[in-house]
Amino acid sequence: MTMQKRITIEPHDILAIEYECTHCKCRHSVRIDAFRQTQMKCPVCNEDWIRGEYNGPERTDQTLPQFARYLTKLQSVANGATIRLVIDSPTLELSREPNA
Ligand SMILES: [Zn+2]
């Protein structure tokens, strides 16, 4: 038997954006309502966290602040519908054990 669990979250469930350094594993979280600028480097080991374009219309350093602004706006715009984000979840394979 295969069971799939459907996990959803609503925009107001999202409180913060968290970075985890792939080099030293430190974590840094910023509330989305206070997110103003991207943390470009790890504050512990100085590893570059965000790479890419820093000038022009496709600035990668603006992607996370824009995402945080959209999430904050999403939390207040819907009043006639419930908006949910669907999270990918693993599919569980269940085997039937014979009754003992
Ligand atoms: Zn680090």
Image (cartoon, grey):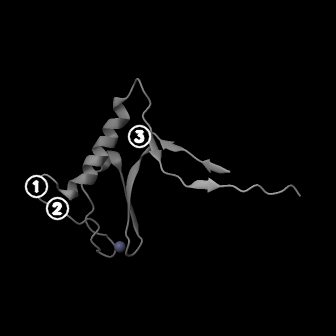
How far separated are the C-alphas under marks 2 and 1? 8 Å
Question: SS class of the residue under badge 3?
Answer: helix
The residue where tag 1 is placed is 56
Q: Quadrant of ligand 1?
A: bottom left
Amino acid type of the residue tagged 1 in the rendering: Gly
Q: Is residue 48 positioned above or below 62 on the image?
A: below
Name the residue located 47 percent from the left edge and 48 percent from the top edge.
Answer: 87
Nearer-N-terminus badge (3/2): 3
Name the residue located 34 percent from the left edge and 36 percent from the top edge.
Answer: 74
* Mark 3 crowdedness (10 Å alpha carbons): few <14, some 14-19, many ≥20: some
- Expressed as whole percent of the image width and height from the top left, the position of residue 30 reads 35, 54
* Mark 2 crowdedness (10 Å alpha carbons): few <14, some 14-19, many ≥20: few
Q: Which mark is residue 53?
A: 2
* 80, 37: nearer the viewer: 80
Camera-side mark, 3 or 1 = 1
Name the residue located 24 percent from the left edge and 55 percent from the top edge.
Answer: 37
* Cβ at disc 3 under 8 Å from ligand 1: no
Q: Quadrant of residue 27?
A: bottom left
Q: Quadrant of residue 56?
A: bottom left
Amino acid type of the residue tagged 2 in the rendering: Glu
Q: Quadrant of the C terminus?
A: bottom right
How far separated are the C-alphas under marks 3 and 2? 28 Å
* 44, 65: nearer the viewer: 65
Amino acid type of the residue tagged 3 in the rendering: Pro
* Mark 1 crowdedness (10 Å alpha carbons): few <14, some 14-19, many ≥20: few
> Marks 2 and 3: in contact by CB < 8 Å?
no
